[in-house]
Amino acid sequence: MKRLIILALALTTGLTACEDWLDKKPLDKISQYDYFKDATALELFSNPFYNNLLAKEPFKEQSDQLVQYNLSNEMIGGNKRTVPSTGGGWTWTDLRRMNTLLAMAAEYCEDPAAVTKYSAITRFFRAFFYFDKVKRFGDVPWYDKELGSADPELYKARDSRELVLTNMIKDIDDAVNSGGLSEKATPYRVNKWTALALKARFCLYEGTYRKYHGINLEGHDYKYYLDLAAETAKQIMDESPYKLFKTGNPATDYVTLFTKEDADEDEYMLAIKNDAGLQIFHNATGYAVMVTQGRPGLTRKLVNAYLMKDGKKFTDQPGWQEMTFLEETKNRDPRMAQSVRTPGYTRIGSTTVEAPDISVANTGYQLVKFVQARPPEGDRGDKSTCDMPVFRFTEVLLNYAEAKAEAGTLTQDDLDISINKIRERAGMPDLDMVEANKNPDWYLSSEEYGYPNVTGPNKGVILEIRRERAIELLEEGFRYNDLMRWKAGYCIDQPITGIYFPGPGEYDLSGDGKADVILYPKGSAKPSAGEGVQVYELDKDIYLTEEKSSKGYMFYHKTVERTKFNEGRDYLYPIPSTERELNPNLEQNPGWSDGLSH
């Protein structure tokens, strides 16, 4: 095995060079003729796709739902977003490796079954790779073969997203129809069902992107992609071995799913393996509980979106705007207490009730979702071992319902086999399509908090599906791209505030009747406090929205200058200027200026 790894590394170095292949076989080096002969070699060559392409820290993505101590460039906008000279996501190394494997395996591998299997896996990753490029840049060049340094295709213009999507669909269909992908639940390896889940994901993205951005291209309209997304998701729902994880305890099932050491094989369709014994970790726990890890906090906008436990809307209550933390967290969707630290919270493996730590969470709403038990040596920033989801069956159900709703073909039966399965696991009442469309949530359709560009007869149920998606997929890396496909960049401009405080004083946030936080007026003497009590000076240690009256929502980023989301520019990223200098046929995305005339 050690020898094979060394050979694979040596070959990789050679394959990523720009020189054309020589006709003669070197006598002193391993060559492609020798290497791509068996299943082991193909496996070793394809393994980097998992590590290079799958996001390991999706929980850190900033959006209108979650912000850090330092806002991302996307959240600040304006001149913070510039055209890079290189990088910026315009990288193609992994694609070259994919095209190399497809060509070399077909020509040199002596094991037909291995060729079928690893070609299918590679086609999955090529579609995955191109999905990321389309989301980021829109039109991109489509390459399905290795290119030499003198190949004229290196200098071609961008292909339309229609051509790229058509080829992505073909890659997935070829992978699935080849028989090379397993139909068993394999949470750490691509199988037939994860390939179909990817297809449903990118077809939903494309369908909604075209619908809300008003894009009409030759080939297929937005409904084609929405119908294909629903059809593909339904195939997974009907034929795959997956189901929602649940033990019958809605108060803990959601958080348990994300803190288990090993991926749940019922629900996780593809996951990134983390293991203490193998020294493979991520940072989700430290990110949520340590003051040095970015100080992430959920926004009040998201917290307000959680329904009451009986299914009624929190924002329909009188006085919801000025409810204190203890008041606003009562009788809510059980997933709230499994996503954000609320009164009565005890960490896994502990019986001690802990209040939100405002020094860690800049909005006061402290993350809980991936937080594991505190290790004996204390928390560290790099020691989380729960597996990180890439594809979950829950997403398939959400994609199915959304695609049907956006296409105008949704029925109550569709909701009952998708959204209402998710709500059942959460201990929440069913979503009624007629009622939702009769009384669309004013909060979710408002300019200040929601999606004012959602219209039509399915407006109410679309808003409810978006609510469910926001809550269920929190911290899984979907939110920013969801806003882009819904043409909802305006959500980034909406308030990013936190917990409400009616003024200076003592506040119980844990629900034990004792003060956890003391706020005192600016310039006043710091009050004495017991051990563990957090003490903050207003307008110095902590900002509130109504400075003159010393009350309001936590507003950590009050002094940060943010620029309004640029509707004509910010839905796509810019192509690096160096790439456009090398290839004059690459046109820049609208609204981005790099100083080049072409």
Image (cartoon, helix red, strand yellow):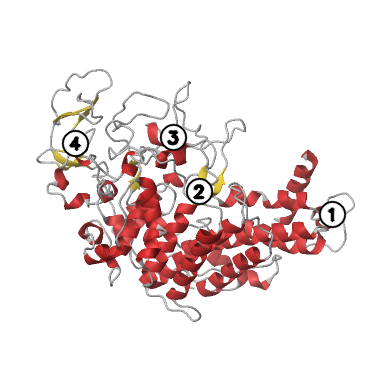
Where is 295 relative to 464, above or below?
above
Numbered label attached to residue 539: 4
User: CA gap, disc 3 to disc 1?
Assistant: 45 Å
Number of labels in the image equals 4
Q: Depth-wise, is mark 3 or mark 1 nearer the camera?
A: 3
Q: As rendered, which of 464 and 35 lies closer to the eye?
A: 464
Q: Residue furthest bottom?
A: 218
Could you tell me residue 56's position as x and y percent?
A: 52, 45
Indicate left or right for 544 with 422 as reference.
left
Q: Is residue 565 visible?
A: no
Badge 2 local density, few (<14 within 10 Å), some, or many (20+)? Answer: many
* Three-letter code, disc 2: Glu
Q: Depth-wise, is mark 3 or mark 4 nearer the camera?
A: 3
User: CA gap, disc 3 to disc 4?
Assistant: 30 Å
What residue would you read off at disc 3?
285
Where is 523 relative to 86, above or below?
above
Badge 1 local density, few (<14 within 10 Å), some, or many (20+)? Answer: few
